[in-house]
């Protein structure tokens, strides 16, 4: 990861001064770097890292950063990982363009390396991510969301990129098509578990520091704990909760009441259980492999995914 | 172009209902379709259109549409080609995501067709476009822009995509690397002339209907006629004009005065001349070719580019 940091800094260089400043800022505020880690570990699991593994990790980190920059525009948020967001420091205009730049830069990285298999895997993920976000917006408006729709949304908007990480890692090590597909599914399960953990953290479950809670409810996002709470509540409670969710964007008391209902209901334990099942299914997929060290590290990553407190 | 319209409609289909609605709206408000036309004509010039030419035209039209949707967010504009913009009808959030979706959809179109040469040409253009826009923002802030910088900006933000059209058209017809490079340069010259014409239209020169004028000055964009006017004015006039440009975003009188100064100065004729020279250089590049019909059509397109009134 240290070698990758240096590599990534080089990739982000630009001859447009404004861009170069912003890129340096982006490098500084880097996050958990889970995605490149998944790329490197799955590459090692399939025989070892190569030049192409660095290309894959850069490509994915660029795409991920692009979506974060665009997310900040979309959510009008002024903070990201405790730092100011690009759009807060510069302008919306700049943030949209920087996101586009990062997207195309990522693709060029792969195009220049003639890594067309990586391109195939990642452009599929990019399309799924925007579709997932739009599907979520469409459903949030009418609050008609079932558990199936929930999983469809998070599969697209969150799990597809982590799936691409694992598939690209394997591909960069020269794995067969079957192995690459299996790694896509491994990453997908990991990504679903990751998103459920995010849902739980937003309710304050298992959380220590960081972002404020209740954000999902304020944005009328139906998360798994809330969906299960609604599903299992009696009609009167369900209707009351749905009315509160509708008022949530403007009413802190409504947010609080919904949160309390979910925290005291069966939704939390249900979501935790789903998350653990996904984690175990992902672990089981590693059975056939021999490299104990990278298996161990991937299982650690999975456990971090579902046990992290931020 | 009729066959392409049907093809493009198919490409834009989506199984996410909200996206499908927006895509149908985008198809309806389609513009001049200059870019696909350049793809088809340059393909014919190099031997004829193929399945791959359709891929190239879809790819480029998708990327172009993506940038228009993002431009509307960036410019906060509520109208586009006389229709409401995506962000006016839906929301900024949706517009950013739809732009990302169109970008990835375009790339997927090329990836699925395994048209990696087209990907190489277009992802270079996409990066240049966002760099060009950011360079423009950086320079606009300080109003320090020379003719060289102006050409650097418009080469990136406008000419690179038209260059990619012509290069992709040639590539789709199986042209050699030299021919593809030559077509890139042909498209670049055409794109530069196109942008100068846009500058002139924004000043009301040669314009009949459509968008209101003076928009560039309101956004503190230094266009070629204005740059030349500043270059050739005496110091007092130059300082006065620069002060007016700084006030322009909020002061309609300042916009009017700058426009009058440019319209009555030497900048208009200077820009027209540069545009004609670029047009003639582009025409000269067609000399070696034999297919008179597609040559004639490309020259017609060039003349349309510099003579259009909207």
Image (spheres, coloured by chain):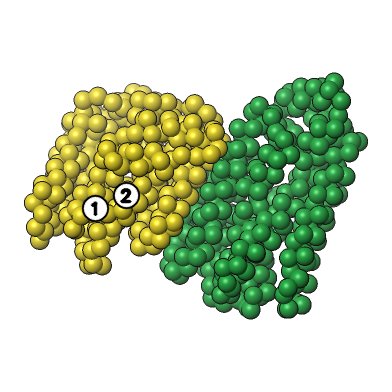
Chain colours: A yellow, B green
Q: Is residue B285 left or right of residue B40?
A: right
> Which residue is painted at 17% across and 39% down in the image?
A304
Instruction: Work out whether residue B30 can be spotted.
Output: no
User: Which image quadrant: the N terminus of chain B?
Assistant: bottom right
- Residue A55 lies, in percent from the top left, at 35, 51
Q: In this view of the protein, can residue B203 be seen by the observer?
A: yes
Mark 2 or mark 1: which comes first in sequence?
Answer: 1
Q: Are marks 2 and 1 on the same chain?
A: yes
Write down the chain letter for disc 1: A
Image point (48%, 68%), residue name: B115
> What percent of the width, then of the height, locates residue A199?
26, 38
The reply to whether discs 2 and 1 touch (Cβ–Cβ < 8 Å) is yes
The subunit carrying tag 2 is A
The alpha-carbon separation of the residues under discs 2 and 1 comes to 8 Å
The residue labelled by disc 1 is A49
Q: Nearer the viewer, residue A182 or B128?
A: B128
Asked if residue B113 is positioned above or below residue B195 in the image, the reply reads below
Q: Is residue B160 left or right of residue B251?
A: left
Label 2 neighbourhood size at 10 Å, few (<14), some (14-19), many (20+)?
A: many
Residue on which the image places disc 2? A54
Q: Which element type, helix, strand or loop, lies under badge 2? A: helix
Residue B233 picture location, percent across and down: 86, 29
Please rate how many residues cluster around mark 1, counting C-alpha atoms within 10 Å: few if below 14, some from 14 to 19, many from 20.
Answer: many
Query: Considering depth in this image, is B309 or B228 the residue closer to the camera?
Result: B228
Q: Residue at x 46, y 65 (%)?
A: B116
């Amino acid at each position: 990861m240290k070698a990758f940091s240096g590599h990534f800094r080089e990739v982000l260089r630009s001859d447009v001064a404004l861009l170069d400043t912003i890129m340096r800022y982006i490098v500084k505020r880097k996050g958990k770097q889970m995605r490149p880690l998944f790329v490197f570990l799955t590459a090692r699991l399939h025989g070892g890292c190569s030049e192409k593994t660095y290309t894959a990790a850069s490509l994915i980190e660029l795409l991920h950063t692009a979506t974060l920059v665009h997310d900040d525009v979309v959510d009008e948020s002024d903070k990201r990982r405790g730092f100011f967001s690009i759009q807060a420091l510069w302008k919306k205009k700049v943030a949209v363009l920087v996101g586009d730049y990062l997207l195309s830069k990522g693709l060029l990285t792969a195009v220049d390396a003639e890594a067309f298999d990586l391109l195939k895997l990642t452009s599929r993920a990019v399309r799924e991510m925007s579709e997932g976000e739009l599907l979520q917006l469409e459903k949030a408006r009418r609050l008609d969301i079932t558990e199936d729709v929930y999983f469809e949304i998070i599969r697209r908007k969150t799990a597809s990129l982590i799936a691409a990480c694992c598939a690209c890692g394997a591909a960069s090590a020269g794995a067969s098509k079957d192995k690459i597909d299996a790694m896509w599914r491994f990453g997908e399960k990991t990504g679903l578990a990751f998103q459920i953990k995010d849902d739980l953290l937003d309710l304050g479950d298992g959380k220590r520091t960081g972002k404020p809670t209740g954000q999902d409810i304020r944005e009328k996002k139906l998360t798994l704990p809330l969906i299960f709470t609604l599903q299992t509540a009696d009609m009167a409670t369900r209707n009351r909760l749905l009315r509160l969710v509708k008022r949530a964007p403007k009413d802190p008391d409504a947010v609080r009441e919904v949160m309390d209902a979910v925290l005291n209901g069966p939704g939390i334990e249900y979501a935790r259980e789903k998350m653990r099942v996904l984690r175990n299914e992902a672990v089981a997929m590693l059975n056939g492999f021999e490299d104990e060290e990278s298996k161990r590290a991937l299982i650690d990553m999975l456990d971090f995914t579902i046990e992290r407190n931020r």
